[in-house]
Amino acid sequence: MPPQSTITAIATGPAAGGVGVIRISGPLALEAARRVVPALPLFPEPRHAYFASIAGLDEGLVIHFPAPASYTGEDVVELMPHGSPKLLSMVLQRLLEHPALRLAEPGEFTRRAFVNGRIDLARAEAVADLVAAQSEAAVRSAAAQLSGELSRRIAAVKERLVPLHADLEASLDFPDEAEDAEAGAGARLDAVRVELEALAAQGAAGALARRGAHVVLFGPVNAGKSTLFNALLGSSRALVDAEPGTTRDVLEATVELNGLAVTFVDTAGLREDAGRVEALGIEKTRAALKGADLALLVAPPEATDVEAWRREAGCEVIVVAAKADLGSRVEGVAVSGLTGSGVSELKALVARRLGAERSEAVALASERHREALGRAVESLKQARAALEVSTLEVVAGETAAALQALDEITGEDAKAELLDAIFRRFCIGK
């Protein structure tokens, strides 16, 4: 993927729309564009929208973004005909008749933006997250990262950690001239570690915003789980019948609660004397509970062994006193899936327990970022411990390891294999 090549791709989605975008990036962007837009001036005004015929098939806008003030940092031309997928494909094929032009690889435009210093790696990854966002919380999280919020936090930490590491290295290389340079290193290490731990604490909320939450409904047979499931969704998705054991498989559906994507999971009722097929469904129930962020224990009015059922879950549990219209002795959120009583209150409680009512956008959402940040924190802990019982070489080495982990987040120390893995998940045209 030589940086001198010129690439092109359709930058809008495959569905029909009012306007489509074809992006060209590289040193021959203008030359390639003129093959399909002959009316484009020899020296077009930067960022000026020209209305012209495109490939003799349509009329639309053409904009030139000269290097380095473009998305990729290279010469970029964007063609904007109408958004017919077939039309865009035909224009693209005309462009690719240019011998020096090739189709862009997935994520190649954004990768070039990273390579050319337009954005760092954390911001580049946020582009893919923003495109894939399925909820308001995911959009806000990706937008915060794209704006550079995470990168700024990492840079602020490095501004304190780099001088500390330099002082430690100076103490090793020039012990006479740098005498007492390590003084106060313990307090400095602690201050940086506390700051990184505060950032890491946002990781769980960020991950939830990015992927959404799974809330599993479980409990004994004939407790009203499927009726409640339908009520939470506001539609009849699950089969409901008075016969116990109606649900024999997991059923999922996603709604948005306070901006957070929440997938409710209806499961088979738990009981000992289940038949072979129903027993398979019960195993799926237990598997779903293992991956749940929150569980709703749906207890019928006559339930007396709520605590025993609660132990089935490996996560936080909300007890739901189901079939409240029939009266219930269960201590929990009183809900009637049949009448809708208490459903709104239950949704609000679920949102609170998942943290969906927090309005701030969390920039730390990527598993890769959280893992690297965790390594940085651990290295700082090791450096602090070594300061008391070991040599300065160990302290300096652990401090360097912490810096390397932080550099991986923003891309200063990113290897080609990592970049390939990251940009491979982008779609073509981004």
Image (cartoon, rainbow, N blue to C red):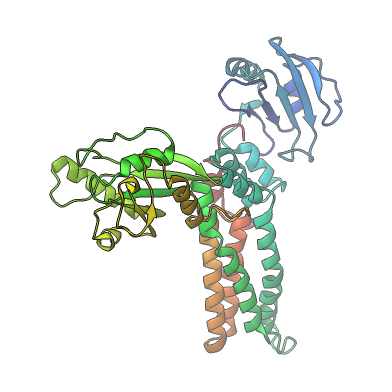
The C terminus is located in which quarter? top right
On the image, the x and y values in percent for residue 82 come to 67, 17
Left or right: 273, with 148 as reference point:
left
Frontmost residue, 26 versus 297: 297
Seen in the picture, residue 54 relative to 180 is either above or below; the reply is above
Frontmost residue, 155 versus 115: 155
Q: Would you say residue 129 is visible in this rendering? A: yes
On the image, the x and y values in percent for residue 211 come to 49, 47
On the image, the x and y values in percent for residue 237 come to 36, 33
The N terminus is located in which quarter? top right
Seen in the picture, residue 111 relative to 402 is either above or below; the reply is above
- Residue at the far top in the pictured view: 56
Left or right: 35, with 172 as reference point:
right
Q: Residue at x 82, y 31 (%)?
A: 47
Left or right: 390, with 300 as reference point:
right
Q: Residue at x 41, y 33 (%)?
A: 235
Frontmost residue, 258 versus 54: 258
Residue 364 occupies quadrant: bottom right
Frontmost residue, 56 versus 280: 280
Q: How many marks?
A: 0
Residue 309 occupies quadrant: bottom left
Q: Would you say residue 1 is visible in this rendering? A: no
Left or right: 204, with 406 as reference point:
left
On the image, the x and y values in percent for residue 249 come to 27, 40
Q: Residue at x 53, y 83 (%)?
A: 385
